[in-house]
Amino acid sequence: MAWRKFVGLVVLFLALCQLATALAQSSSTSYKVEETYFGSGGELDAQSSNYRSKQAAGELGVGNTASTSYQAQAGFNTTDTPLLEVLVNGGVYDFDVLDSSLVKTLSTSFSVRNYLASGYIAQIVGTAPKGAGGGHTLTNMSSAAASSPGTEQFGINLVANTSPSVGANPSQVPDTSFGFGQAAAGYNTANQFKYNDGDTIAFSNSSSGTTLYTISAIANITTNTQAGFYGTSLFVVVVPTF
Amino acid sequence: MQKIITYIKKFAIVAAGVLFTSGIVLPTLFNTSVYAAQMQSRSLTISSSANGNISTDAAGNSVAAGQGGNGAAAKYRFGFIAPGAASTLQSIEFQFCTSPIPGVTCTLPTGMSVASAVLGTSGDAPTGMTGWALGTSGDAPTDSASIDGGTGGRIRVTRTNGTNVSSDTASTITFTTIKNPTSDNYAFYVRILTYTSTSYTTQRDYGTVASSTAQQVDITAKVQEKINFSVGTTITAPTAACTAYSDSGALALGDTNGILDTATAYAAVSYFRLNTNSVNGAIVQYSGETLKSGSNSITAINGGTETSGGTSSTPGTAQFGLGIDTTDASYSFTQLAAVANPAYGSGGGTITAGGTAKFNFNPASKTTPITLASSSGGVTCDTASVRYLGNISTSVPAGIYQTTITYIAVPTF
């Protein structure tokens, strides 16, 4: 009888080990847990010839949790597929007629969501507005500075400003439990604007739900900024690190 | 009861055996996957998130390959840490797919093309692990590689290096002239597979990176053609706004009562101020007659014939001339320059007989304006001090002599 109990316990142990192997996909320098669950029930990849699903019951908590040394996606219905979603509210934005005595502003937005990454950076690429036919290029604000009408300036930031009144702070969707993106230094101070082609303007140090960023741009000219039609195409390049 | 317990125990043992066999033994026997380590800190930095149809900016200017606004010829820089192991790493395959998962059917992202990819050199040369060469012939970059049952893009690089990559090695490899997918806000993936040999056979490491195109933000603006030109006789500071002169412009030549004298030369100064954003420069001209009183006149200096160096003052001789006085405190030419020949920029200096100040005046300017100063581009805020000379001879009839000199600024945009 004793050997039967022993065999039974060994088999039970091995079976539990196999169960754990099936559900955990983990590693890091010390360990990593990509997909696992704790709760009263659930199935990461239930399927038959007719359906395939993820199932959850008794889910205790959802969302990303992180500290300086770890991060995890909580919830049964997390996915093991890397994700990058970049949505730029593109189109044509016109400063209209620039004036040496008055700052001109405009704003647009973009959002970033990524998953199973250790974070991302968002870069802005493109020149400052340039005269048609390869003419004069408005001076970009290579370091953060305030708007100064009468000085040639082109700059942006990603926060709410009062002088001039434009922009909004980054917002997490649906809330700060899920999104972690933030504006980068140089672009994160109210009423201070900057623009350098290729600069990092936003980042997240972990996988993040949707973060909505508002890009506010300003343009100032001098009394002898060359006349003409100016234009540029700016692009947001998001680089996730997996 | 004892029988039931026995059956339960037997069933448990059999069930456990089945579980053991199916869960441990079979997977071990039939697991055909090759061990491969996942690369860490994987990233893909693209030079442009513009879709592959874009290579010009909002103003119609062409954007060079590898720059932010060119999605038709973008630069892809892969960064990763190759895990250290007791094996070589001699080839890498980059698979461009709509799905990140190795083993899942790979489909080339819509509109994307890697067939013209070139391995970066100079500042874009590989770092970390080096010595790479772009695959050729059957390993050349292609948009139609058979990958996991699908057709995707593929770039292969190889190097002959028999040394094990024994420690984690951060590396970058850059490719240029890749055409991005042609849709906006379109995520795509690149699967990276490394191999121990140059034949792409024994897989060593793997990892997937993601990137995305994005809709472009076109910013436009207009700067209007502009000229601020004013003339006055009362000194005012230009200020940052290049404040215009606003006085009447009246000027009296002579003593305190405006009386000329045969023994004394007299001069007076007026000013003009110019600001223009003309691209191709501006000229300032004068137009007018010499001093006149009815039918009488004071002869223009040198008889109205301009000279290259200008003419000095000669008290006792009828002379009316003008010249820009560069020594005047209010003079501030930065972009403008006085015409040198005939000299219109030598009005500063003494006006005694044979003095250093030089003047010219052309009476024909009344109908054909004479250029006094010019610039090759825009003018921020330049102020000119124009000095007028008045001398009379003993034969000049008495009277009130007057003239109106009109200044004209002509910017070329």
Image: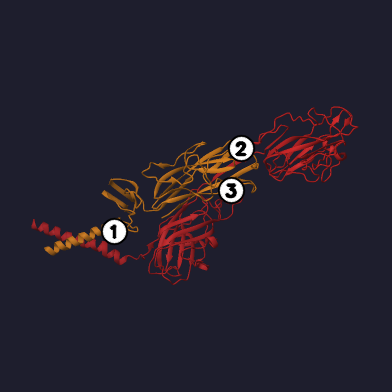
- Of all residues, the one furthest to the left in this rendering is B1
Dot 3: chain letter: B
Residue at mark 2: A100
Q: Is residue B173 left or right of residue A60?
A: right
Q: Are marks 3 and 2 on the same chain?
A: no
Q: x and y percent of residue B165 in the render? A: 41, 67
How far is disc 3 from disc 1 in space, using C-alphas? 53 Å
Task: Determine the residue positioned at 30% across, 55% down.
Answer: A23
Give the color of chain A as drawn. Answer: orange
Q: Give the spatial CA distance, label 3 vs label 2.
A: 25 Å
Which residue is more in the foreground, B62 or A9? B62
Which quarter of the rendered picture does the C terminus of chain A lie within?
A: bottom left
Residue B293 lies, in percent from the top left, at 86, 28
> Which type of secondary structure does the marked residue at label 2 adopt?
loop
Q: Which mark is residue B242?
A: none
What is the three-letter code of the residue carrying label 2? Ser
Residue name at image x 33 percent, y 50 percent: A54
**Mark number, residue B57:** 3
Residue at 38% in and 67% down: B85
Question: Which chain is rendered red in the image?
Answer: B
Residue A196 visible within the image: yes
Question: Is disc 2 surrounded by few (<14), some (14 to 19) or many (20+) residues within 10 Å?
Answer: many
Instruction: Give the spatial CA distance, label 1 vs label 2.
Output: 68 Å
Mark 1, residues whose alpha carbon is within 10 Å: few (<14), some, or many (≥20)?
A: few
Contact flag, marks 3 and 2 (Cβ < 8 Å) = no
